[in-house]
Image (cartoon, rainbow, N blue to C red):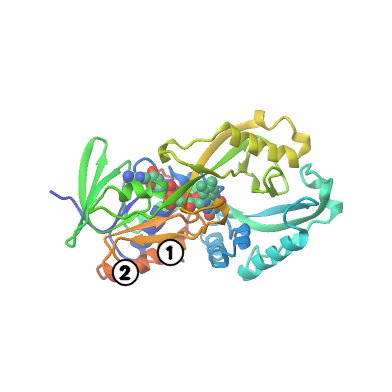
Amino acid sequence: MTGCRYDIVVIGGGIHGVGITQAAAAAGYSVLLLEKSALAAGTSSKSSKLIHGGLRYLETYQFGLVAESLRERALLLKLAPGLVKLRPFIIPVYKKTRRAPWLVRLGLSLYAVLGRFREGASFHTIPSSDWQSLDGLRTDDLKAVFSYSDAQTDDRLLTRAVMNSALELGAQYEMPAEFVGAQLDEAGNIVRYRVDHTEKQCVAGILINTAGPWVNEVLARVTPAQVAPAISLVQGSHIVIGQQFKRGIYYVESPRDGRAVFVMPRQNDTLVGTTEIRFRGHPDTVTTFPRERSYLCSVVEYYFPALRGTIANSIIGAFAGLRVLPEGKGHAFHRPRETILRSDNETHPHILSVYGGKLTGYRATAEKVINHLRPFLPERSAIASTRELPLTPPRDDV
Ligand SMILES: Cc1cc2nc3c(=O)[nH]c(=O)nc-3n(C[C@H](O)[C@H](O)[C@H](O)COP(=O)(O)OP(=O)(O)OC[C@H]3O[C@@H](n4cnc5c(N)ncnc54)[C@H](O)[C@@H]3O)c2cc1C
């Protein structure tokens, strides 16, 4: 026996799941979201919490991704002013920094062009007379300091705000509700999920799999069996420290391996990240390792020598998240960060899975997913556009 029928059932309440639920409801579709634990329980509360174009992706020539992310940044600054705020970013360039001042200047100029010189696109150099005011930043061998803008958010609150918007448009959700299986069928896909210890069913016109690092686990629960693309899960950890930095977010190179590390002050603490290591376990078990904590401490202590020996003791929190990247050889940094959409059948999709992606681009991804699926869904009248729906910090708990 089956329960309700929905045009779309979304599996996973991270930023992609709620974004697609909001876009589906705005387009007039009936939509149900299933989340096995809590909204943003996965990667969407473990990110660096930046709404940014991704300056470093210019080095791997991902210009389309950077331009789209900057477009989305501008839109979120407008739609969610209580949740997404521009912050000054500071890039110090030393004698031994891998990227010379001319290269950083070139990157920032390109970033401004791709951002179409909108709000926050400009950058400048901080004169040496002002270096003493940079929170005790190391100044020996310092050649130049650049300042530009990007935006910061609270990823968990943003996810909840988008879900609230979806609910206002008529979307439904079940939580905690674990997707346990689906039988794909022309007449409607039968979806089974567990709430407490009871199994429930519903029928979905189309299933959307936004289970983040669990994406292939969810796909493996679908009948008939699906071919899952090969992916690697790459762990990125952050530490939260008690120190405050007043001038902005520092964007530095790890002296050990040259990787980019952000030192990101927030209201009452500072977030430092990330690391990048291959993860081989089950996504439920991801956790930070002591060597990641000491790596991040050493970066802060290198650039802020007055804090040497203090950072490990000032750690007040730590968390690890998992990036979903296409399987490939070589360093994770060189693999594409674009979101990949895969459906079971291009001419008659029953299930579409979302791989990878960025917090920043969630709305654009959701729009692409709905536009892609529109020809296969019943005709409905749109009731709103996600380009115009304001997002407010949530007060109630969804
Ligand atoms: C270390 C790190 C830093 C990052 N920093 C940034 C950044 O600063 N800016 C940026 O734009 N992007 C950033 N990203 C990328 C961004 O965080 C992710 O792309 C995004 O959060 C992924 O969201 P998602 O909805 O796809 O997955 P998730 O947030 O992981 O959501 C998947 C959800 O599915 C649920 N689920 C799993 N299985 C089931 C099931 N069987 N039934 C029901 N529910 C299920 C899980 O509980 C989870 O809530 C970062 C990523 C990492 C790893």
Camera-side residue of 387 and 14: 14
Q: Is residue 390 left or right of 125 when viewed as pictured?
A: left
| Residue type at the position of mark 2 | Arg
> Callout 2: helix, strand or loop?
helix
The picture quadrant where one finds residue 108 is: bottom right
Q: Residues within 10 Å of mark 2 (few under 14, many from 20)?
A: some
Q: 160 or 62: which is nearer to us?
A: 62
- Residue 86 placement (x, y as % from top left): 62, 56
Q: Is residue 101 visible?
A: yes
- Left or right of 301, for residue 43: left
Q: Look at discs 2 and 1 and give the one toward the viewer.
A: 2
In the drawing, what numbered circle is on residue 374?
Answer: 2
At mark 1, the secondary structure is loop
Mark 2 or 1, nearer chain start:
2
Residue 69 on image: x %, y %: 54, 62
Q: Looking at the image, is 138 positioned above or below residue 77?
A: above
Q: Could you tell whether 107 is left or right of 336 in the image?
A: right
Q: Is residue 140 left or right of residue 205?
A: right
Looking at the image, which residue is at 45% across and 40% down? 280
In the rendered image, is residue 383 in sight? no
Q: Which residue is mark 1?
A: 386
